[in-house]
Image (cartoon, rainbow, N blue to C red):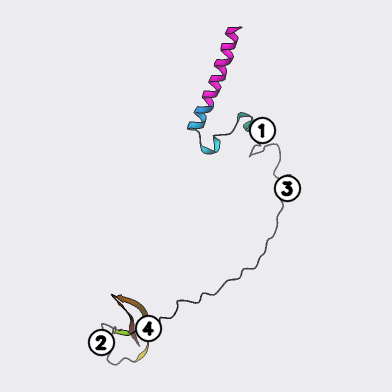
Amino acid sequence: MELEDLKRENQALKQQLDQLIKLINGFKSERFVGALDAVNQLNLFDQDTPVEEQSTEKQEVTYTRVKKQHQGRNKLPEHLPVKEIIIEPDQSVDGLVKIGQEVSETLEYTPASLVKRRTIRPKYA
């Protein structure tokens, strides 16, 4: 009787050890999967059912999306002093007509004051 008890206890300890090793070394998704779950799991590639018999239901889904228009940057305050920098092209502009300019404004911080820097790039044709 004592020999059978020791064999059962040995078998139970081996099973616990196998489970612990599987918990330590297995992937996270496999850590708590029991042996019975693997037997009851359906086969992904079911060979018994032909493709024609497998029914799939298609649904058409429609929705309306409201796209908000971005307002862009806020205007820089008008009360700030302006420091203008005009960048002329490196080439000679003799005989060319100015057709416009591109203006960009950035804030420049100097200790204890803010100055609006306006960069102007004339365009010639």
Q: Which mark is residue 112?
A: none
Q: Which residue is mark 2?
A: 92
Q: Which residue is mark 3?
A: 55
Task: Answer with left or right where residue 84 lies relative to residue 75.
Answer: left
Would you call the spot at circle 1 few (<14 residues within 10 Å), some (14-19), or many (20 or more)?
few
The residues colored magenta run 1-18
CA gap between label 4 and label 2 equals: 19 Å
CA gap between label 2 and label 3 equals: 75 Å
Residue 51: x and y in percent read 69, 44
CA gap between label 3 and label 1 equals: 22 Å
User: Which circle's residue, 1 or 2, is located before the other in the chain?
Assistant: 1
Residue 26: x and y in percent read 50, 33
Q: Quick check: marks 2 and 3 in contact, CB under 8 Å?
A: no
Which of 42/104 is in front?
Answer: 104
CA gap between label 1 and label 2 equals: 83 Å
Q: Which mark is residue 102?
A: 4
Label 2 SS: loop
User: Which circle's residue, 4 or 3, is located before the other in the chain?
Assistant: 3
Label 3 SS: loop
Q: Disc 2 residue type?
A: Ser
Which of 122/25 is in front?
Answer: 25
Quadrant position of residue 86 = bottom left
